[in-house]
Amino acid sequence: KLKVGVLVSGSGSNLQALIDSCAAPDHPAEIVTVISNRPGVKALERARNAGIEAVTIDHKTFADRTGFDAEMQRALDAAGVEFVCLAGFMRLLTTEFVEHWSGRMINIHPSLLPAFKGLNVQQRAIDAGARFSGCTVHFVTPEMDVGPIIQQAAVPILQGDSAESLAARILEQEHRIYPGSLRWIAEGRVKIEGERVLLDGATAPSASLL
Ligand code: GAR
């Protein structure tokens, strides 16, 4: 099985979706460690409840990003991690760390990239008058929220939506497409071609509109 490490910072609902999906006996990936840069978050509890190693590496105890990322690298290597999933991980990563995991690290972002990179994206989509938003699973490259896109799902933005109501609608789709993307990757069906991802075969839908 592909040994996966998940990096988290908060609630970990996407982590939970990955844990639940990987629990299927025939699943080709296995989560071997969960690392949080924030102590005491719910994501760590979710990992422990699933019998998965839960590690806290508090970024505040490091002088700079290089030291923090080096410690994460050490922890990932110690757990035998081959592939990294960012699941609500809210720290920028150094170019060195990202390049080490090039083609072997994915992220989920709550917008239809390349629109609305960065933070506070649900409110920004509402404020822009967008009629749809959604979520994107993509490979991580040194520039934030830019790498090759694996899968997206769109949701409508409704009259009267708040950032919270839109975030909840998007999260439902995140919980569907993130495990789906990881499974395709672990099955060897995802290839990076330049700046794009090619999905193998007729069975992998590349988009879904709800
Ligand atoms: C999710 O909406 C995820 O897409 C977003 O944070 C939330 C984490 O929720 N990630 C980012 O904004 C990354 N820049 P979770 O902890 O419940 O999975």
Image: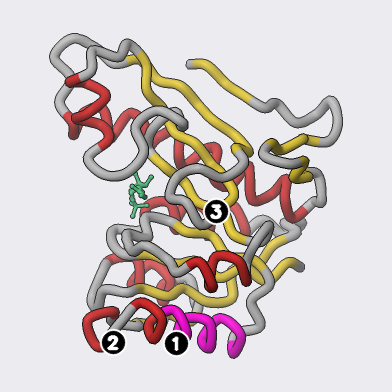
Q: Residue 140's mark?
A: 3
92 relative to 22 in the view: left or right: left
131 relative to 128 in the view: left or right: right
Residue density around tag 3, few if under 14, some if 14–19, many if 20 or more, within 10 Å: many
Disc 2 residue type? Phe
Identify whether 118 is placed above or below 11: above
Residue density around tag 2, few if under 14, some if 14–19, many if 20 or more, within 10 Å: few
Residue 12, image x and y in percent? 36, 58
Q: Residue 29's mark?
A: none
Q: CA distance from mark 2 to mark 1?
A: 9 Å
Q: Is mark 2 within 8 Å of ligand 1?
A: no
Q: Residue furthest right?
A: 201
In the structure shown, which secondary structural element does the residue marked by tag 3 occupy? loop
Residue positioned 36% across, 38% down in the render: 117
Residue 42, image x and y in percent? 28, 66
Discs 2, 1 touching: Cβ within 8 Å: yes
Q: Which residue is mark 1?
A: 71
Viewer-closest of 129 and 47: 129
Any magenta on residue 77? Answer: yes
Residue positioned 76% across, 68% down in the render: 1
Rendering quarter of residue 124? top left
Discs 1, 3 touching: Cβ within 8 Å: no
Residue positioned 86% across, 31% down in the render: 201
Residue density around tag 1, few if under 14, some if 14–19, many if 20 or more, within 10 Å: some
Q: Which residues are magenta?
A: 69-78
Disc 3 residue type? Val
Q: Which residue is mark 2?
A: 62
In the structure shown, which secondary structural element does the residue marked by tag 2 occupy? loop
Residue positioned 53% across, 60% down in the render: 85
Viewer-closest of 2 and 128: 128
Pick whichever of labels 3 and 2 is earlier in the sequence.
2
Residue 134, image x and y in percent? 41, 27
